[in-house]
Image (cartoon, rainbow, N blue to C red):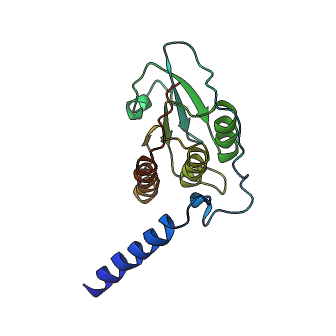
């Protein structure tokens, strides 16, 4: 029981320090230095009128594969423009060039040295720098710990962003 209480206390102290950081880049903590810093770029959307944009982040699974209904994981339905990205650099470039999509489906295990959690950190950095709520998300990862890490990060950011009255971006 004592270990449980020390865990709660450690998390509360972290949260206190986290909220007291003010306007610093809160989500750049523990990030490898070779990920590009968030750039300030104008937010724009490029998509067909009437269809929402879904980023599918996975290095192996084709979201349009006929054998499996992968779009069942989409938080915004199946009638979407799909952007299939396979690594963190593609993800970061797309976000900084096009702004936020309507939704993102994360895989945790990517083929390079980065994973879906690193992409979720890039997303929270971008959203924080532009004072935006994150887009809808889901995870189709078979890695339960990785999936939980992504969801925990994005849910905690969403709580913080709502508390700071960040705006929702709907193209």
**Residue that lies at the very extreme toward the bottom in this rendered image:** 2
Q: Quadrant of residue 69?
A: top left
Task: State which quarter of the image contains the N terminus.
Answer: bottom left
Asked whether the viewer can see residue 28, the reply is yes
Q: Quadrant of residue 96?
A: top right
Left/right of residue 74 with respect to residue 3 in the rendered view: right
Left/right of residue 142 with respect to residue 22 in the rendered view: left
Q: Which residue is at 43% across, 32% downward?
A: 70
Q: Which residue is at 62% across, 60% downward?
A: 24
Q: Where 24 falls versus 50 (above or below)?
A: below
Location of residue 58 in the rendering, given as x and y in whole percent from the top left corner: 56, 41
**Residue that lies at the very extreme toward the left in this rendered image:** 1
Left/right of residue 80 with respect to residue 95 in the rendered view: left
Location of residue 160 in the rendering, given as x and y in whole percent from the top left corner: 44, 53
Q: Where 33 falls versus 48 (above or below)?
A: below
Q: How many marks?
A: 0
Q: Quadrant of residue 144?
A: bottom left
Location of residue 55 in the rendering, given as x and y in whole percent from the top left corner: 55, 33
Q: Where 30 falls versus 125 (above or below)?
A: below
């Amino acid at each position: 029981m004592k270990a449980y209480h020390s865990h709660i206390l450690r998390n509360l102290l972290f949260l206190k320090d986290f909220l007291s950081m003010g306007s610093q880049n809160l989500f750049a903590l523990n990030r490898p230095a070779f990920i590009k810093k968030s750039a300030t770029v104008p937010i724009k959307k490029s998509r067909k009128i009437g269809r929402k944009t879904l980023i599918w982040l996975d290095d192996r699974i084709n979201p349009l594969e006929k054998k499996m209904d992968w779009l069942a994981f989409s938080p915004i339905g199946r009638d979407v423009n799909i952007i299939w990205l396979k690594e963190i650099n593609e993800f970061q470039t797309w976000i900084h060039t096009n702004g936020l999509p309507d939704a993102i489906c994360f895989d945790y295990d990517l083929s390079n040295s980065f994973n879906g959690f690193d992409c979720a950190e890039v997303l929270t950095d971008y959203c924080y720098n532009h004072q935006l709520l994150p887009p809808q998300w889901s995870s189709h990862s078979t890695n339960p710990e990785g999936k939980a890490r992504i969801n925990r990060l994005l849910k905690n950011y969403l709580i913080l962003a709502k508390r700071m009255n960040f705006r929702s971006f709907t193209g």
